[in-house]
Image (cartoon, grey):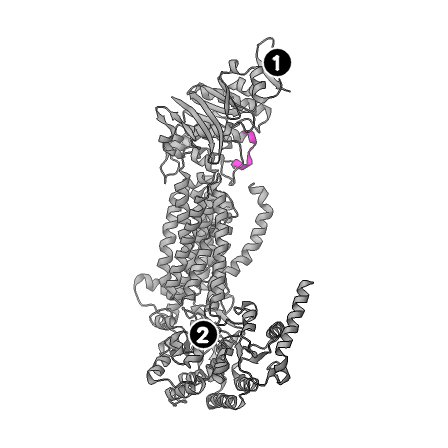
Amino acid sequence: MNIEGHDLTIGYPDRTVGRGLDIALATGEVLALLGPNGGGKTTLLKTLLGLLKPKSGEVRMGDKPLGGYSIRDRARVIAYVPQVHIGTFAFTVETVVLMGRTAHGSLFSRPSARDRAVAQAVLERFGIAALADRPYTMISGGERQLVLLARALAQEPQFIVLDEPTVSLDFGNQGKVMNEIRALAKSGHGVLFTTHDPNHALRAADRAFLLRDGTRIADGPVAAVLKQDQLEALYQASVERLTDRTSGAVAFLPG
Amino acid sequence: MTRSALPGLAIATAVLIAGLLLAFTIGRYPVSLAELGNVLLAKFSGHRPDVPGAVESVILQVRGPRVLAAALVGAALAVAGTAFQGLFRNPLVSPDILGASSGAALGAVIGIFLSLGVLAIQAFAFLGGLFAVAAVYMIGSAVRSRDPILVLVLTGVVVGALLGAGVGLVKYLADPYNQLPAMTFWLLGSLAAANVSDLLPLFGPVGVGTAVLIALRWRMNVMSLPEEEARSLGVATGPLRIAIVAAATLTTSASVATAGIIGWVGLVVPHLARSLVGPDFARLLPTAAILGGGYLLVIDTLARTAAEVEIPLGILTAVVGTPFFIWLLASMQRTWS
Amino acid sequence: MNMRINRRMFLASAAALFAPRVARAATVTDATGRALVVPEKVARVFPAGPPAAILLYTLAPDVLLGWPRANRPEECDYLLPDACTRAEVGRITGRGNTANLESVIALKPDLILDVGATSATFVSLAERVQQQTNIPYALLDGRFDAIAETYRKLGELTGRKADAEKMARYAEDTIKATVGRIAAIAPSSRPRAYYARGPRGLVTGLGGSINVETIEMLAQNVAGGNQGGLANVSIEQVLLWNPDVIITIDQDFAANMRNDPAWASVKAVRDGRVHLSPKMPFGWVDFPPSANRLIGLRWLAKILYPDKFPEDIRAQTREFYAMFYHRTPSDAQIDHVLAGRD
């Protein structure tokens, strides 16, 4: 299954953010969305999630336009992991993850035994089952990111879209989340994430999509797209390239 | 969390039962426990009670309906406050956030101004509350914004202020010897006049509104997340928000129509309930309802027994609510950000 | 600076305007001891509130500039048509003014008349308005037992001493004829009365309140234990008081309470002693508290002590209305009034 955006003009009622965008995400692959602040990453993300209608062009999911799905049906196919935030109310971790099951229940239903089993399974998958009864407001930032990942997975989606999943995490947790993203692709999910760090894209993504001022700079396999000149063009800043002599792994340093 | 819900609910229920016992046995007119038991037993077995007529009428016609009305109004305000706090993701919100109370107040003072009967005044108040919230909702939706919740709250504040000015105008034009005192007393909130015929028009809307909210309890959890998150979890936030606002407004307007304006209950009780059973609406809503009923019963018992003259409920709830609110502000950073 | 000049200029011109009248003026003291300089001929009087308007109408309908609130056509059936239909001019009562002081000045009154409480609040209000408008502001005592004195003062102020004396005598006679006849009854053996206001009858006048002055003159006010104005009470409290007589001004309450089981056990209800107060063109108990309460006192005496007051209330009503309202009511009108209808 694919999510595809064709010739998209994206933006808000009072403002156009990007034009002429073509983007595709297939199940089983990881796509990283890179670009400077204000370049339209979040707007494109929300358009692909169906939270924002494209101003022109069309987003299709499978063989139907995205707008043809009900909110509930859509949530059973695409899950969204927002940037980590602290909620207003101190729901338990288990309750937060169970919220991922909402689209599988009816308007008036509460989580069923099966919903609880799914929640338990995803909590275990991310190694946070011990946190189940803790208030979501009282755990660490890295744990919160995992809880939100678990909630997304509890939706049993085919696609997972993450907004800057590593942004407020410490170094160790960043690596952990990268690994989880890879693992999601391995289990057949299509993953789209935005990031400010090209190294995260190199580490976790199959393809990268570079977006600047609402226009596509490049789109393709990370090895082909994430090059020094491309990145310098993308960020309008100098970038240094490092290569590990033994493994041949590449990393970039800003400045 | 499931494990810790039971003690919280038990505490709330104990408060309600204590409130009921207290309210039934204490009052300006002395009624002994024996007389109370006698009348209630007779009522259920269909015999004539063996007590003086005045005692029977105090229990069945005066105190009984008032006790039930107090419990219902307290429950209604607490449930509406809980719903609005979740919907607006803000624990400092109270049931009148969208102008239900101001609308009801304007309806009531217009009713008094036109020298209508009690039922008509209550109907005016009820409809005033509904119309005010409907207007706020329509204006708020017409304003296009990326933050519909904020626009809604601000519209509520603005329209509420306008309605307040309307109340002021009607009071200003009112006859100072007859209508003005009636308006003042009404606006301060009281259950002094509650009688049997109030119970059905109160219970109907409160029951319907509360039932809808409890039915939507799981969806309300999700609605307390940021808008886009809730939608990405499969919740049609627009229609659901209308349903929650309508249900909460129904309960608020009905209770304001019966009891006048009673502040603080809808703000304070949801917090107490949350500290007892946590934020999950499935447990929070029933706990808040039970606790709210018990809380207002205790307050109303105080209002009708402390002096020969009724103490307005709005004043008593404010006296209790203000220190609580200050404590809340002081401890706010710890519990939510 | 600019403002001060304007104000000074205004005061100067106002003083010039009134100077000729002041020259031929008399000095009268009002109920608070304030000396007022009033013109020899007072032809235009502005009533500060409903009690003043009614008092003024009864004594000198021709000088009344208007009414705080426009009278309804039904009310005008009982009053002089010309005086009754005069314009609505609002009221001056502290913060709740509905009268614009500029309009008050524009009406060129010779005198502003206020009848009511004579506490420091109202004295200072009177002083302020008088200073601002340069129109003498007379504050007369609105309490019921001061009514004869108030009439005499008003007679002095308006130069109608003879008419005022007649009305003052009537007031004194009325109080003597009613209170005097029950003087032998110890206060504790007088009927216990509850004054019910509001659509549910649960607003009442506490002890000393202007609303229940006439009731407290003749009976025991059950709510008299607490001093104050109007207050909300519970039905339970009324049941506990168990009054012998209930007096109400609210037609809805009077109609509904008879079928309300909550009230059924009250002694007054069981004995059929719930009385709806007449209210046309003005209420007989407190609505508003003015000269209209004189006929109310006779009515109260009759319902409280039916045996002691065999007089025909219809004849008394006719006499009072003719003398104070300057219009003799028809029998049908008297029936209507006594039924307590609007």
Work out whether residue A92 or residue C169 is closer to the camera in this orientation and state it. Answer: C169
* Image location (x, y in percent) of residue C151: 53, 85
> Magenta segment range?
A136-142
Residue kind at label 1, given as amino acid type: Leu
Query: Picture quarter containing residue A27?
Result: top left
* Image location (x, y in percent) of residue C155: 54, 86
Magenta: main secondary structure equals helix
Residue C15 vertical placement versus B220 (above, below): below
Task: Decide whether residue A139 is among the magenta residues.
Answer: yes
Count of numbered tags: 2
* Image location (x, y in percent) of residue C62: 48, 82
Task: Decide whether residue C148 is among the magenta residues.
Answer: no
Query: Picture quarter containing residue B53?
Result: bottom left
Q: Residue furthest right?
A: C1
Is label 1 or label 2 in front? 1
* Disc 1: host chain: A
Residue placed under numbered mark 1 in the picture: A242
Residue kind at label 2, given as amino acid type: Trp
Residue B191 in sight: yes
**Discs 1, 2 touching: Cβ within 8 Å:** no
Dividing the image into 4 quarters, which one contains the N terminus of chain C?
Answer: bottom right
Report, in whole angstroms, how far the alpha carbon at label 1 lies from the one at label 2. Answer: 95 Å
Residue placed under numbered mark 2 in the picture: C241
Q: Residue furthest top?
A: A246
Q: State the residue at coordinates (60%, 78%).
A: C136
Q: SS at mark 1?
A: strand
Q: SS at mark 2?
A: helix
Residue C35 in sight: no
* Disc 2: host chain: C
Residue A110 vertical placement versus C240 (above, below): above
Work out whether residue B124 or residue C328 is closer to the camera in this orientation and state it. Answer: C328
